[in-house]
Amino acid sequence: MKLLLAFVIMLVIAVLGSRFTFLDRRASLGFRSIMLTGTEYIFIGVLLGSLGLDILDTEALKKMEPFLILALCWVGFLFGLQFKIRDLKKLPGFYFFISAAQAVMTFCLVALAMYFILKPFAVATALIVTPYVELPGIALLMIALTLGSSSSCTAQSALAIVSKTYKFKNRRLLDLMRYISGLDGFYALCFFAAAVSILPGVGAAGFNLLQSLKWLSFSCILGIIPALIFISLSRLRFSNQEFLLFLIGTVTFCGGLAYQLDYSPLISGLVCGVFTANFSRHHMRAFSEILHAEKSIYVILLLLLGAAWKFQTGYILIVTAIYITVRILGKLLGTYLGAKIFNPGFKVPPTCGLCLLSEGGHAVAIIMSFKLLYPSIAEPLVTILVLSLIVNEIISPWFILSQCTPIDPLLGEKKEQA
């Protein structure tokens, strides 16, 4: 009965949230940024979880895994559909290089910081994860690399809020930031694939290069097989309903197959989306259909994230503060070096990396994917992500305004008064 109630509540919230979460709010930029990304649904998930009404308890969350698998594969598939090589070649090269520079720098700095901050405190780390069980070194490395992967993501929500409220003199800079925030998620997912391949499979005893390469190869194969089936089916005559059925079946099959074989639905979904984008005639139609359900899927991810969150104090709060600080440093330094080395042809402020602090769906998907594969060591990652997500969504719009000069700083207020 509790499981049925939890399912109905999640379904209702996901449907309503897809309609109302992303509307404009008459509130501060930081608050609107939180509402635009749907961060409030994390707290609804907390209310439904073990810290609240206990409707989504541990047993219910375990039975909700099929929805999580579908959501993760859906996110990866949607993101992969945007990477049609022929279209990407039309973009200036500096978009890719600057994006890569800031993503790599953020990933390296955060991963190194997390590893060396957690390593001397084996007891404290173990207490965060599993009481009285020491965290193995290889698992600690995987945690650090996963946090580095999630930190390199940038959400477009804060940029969308600010650009809708203000007009800017340096629009080219804002466009550059948008492209970077749209591209760095791909690098983040590649980093995450490398991170989880270190200890492939739940039963793996330790690092083995051959096993890691095999895991990465099979992750790709498990994405290509459903894509080939979808491409074959889409060559036939079909109605709109049949096409949507093909899509849902492809994503469900891809995610379920990957999870049953101890692979990541997120990574296999990404490969499936990239393959479909480049070899299917109907990739734009598929993108439109998949995008239509994105908000509902994202709400489900946030609800499950909040319900799974076991808030803890003490040492984990120190780690979170360091994570947020080093992530900001990585964004700053990476964007600065990228703009210096790969000159975009217009002025880029040395601190424009502050425009890229917003975190969003890809970071949530990475952490939830890690929790799905390695639930026993994922607790600290959930806490770090949730707290970082809240902080960055509050501060990121103001940092964007500090870098991109508005033509009329009162324009947003005039719009609302009108």
Image (cartoon, rainbow, N blue to C red):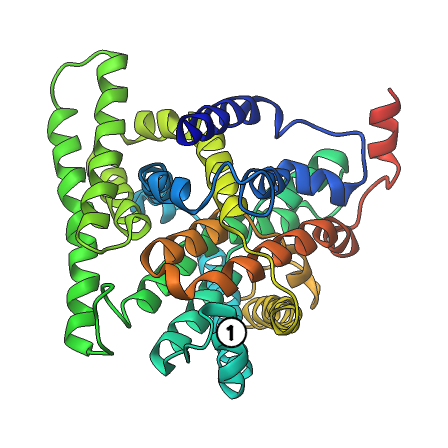
Q: Is residue 152 at least partly visible in the picture? A: no
| Quarter of the N terminus within the rendering | top left
Q: Is residue 60 at least partly visible in the picture? A: yes
Give the amino acid type for the residue marked by disc 1 in the picture: Leu
- In the shown orientation, is residue 387 left or right of residue 364? right
Residue situated furthest bottom in the rendering: 120
- Neighbours of disc 1 within 10 Å: few (<14), some (14-19), many (20+): some
Residue toward you, 135 or 176: 135
Among the 4 quarters of the image, the one containing residue 315: bottom right
| Quarter of the C terminus within the rendering | top right
* Residue found at x 46% / y 26%: 5
Say if 393 sits above or below 205 in the image.
Answer: above
Image location of residue 153, percent across then percent down: 51, 56
Residue toward you, 374 or 112: 374
Residue under numbered circle 1: 127
Residue toward you, 368 or 3: 3
* Residue found at x 57% / y 73%: 337
User: In the structure shown, which secondary structural element does the residue marked by tag 1 occupy?
Assistant: helix
Image location of residue 17, percent across then percent down: 56, 27
Among the 4 quarters of the image, the one containing residue 387: bottom right
* Residue found at x 61% / y 29%: 21
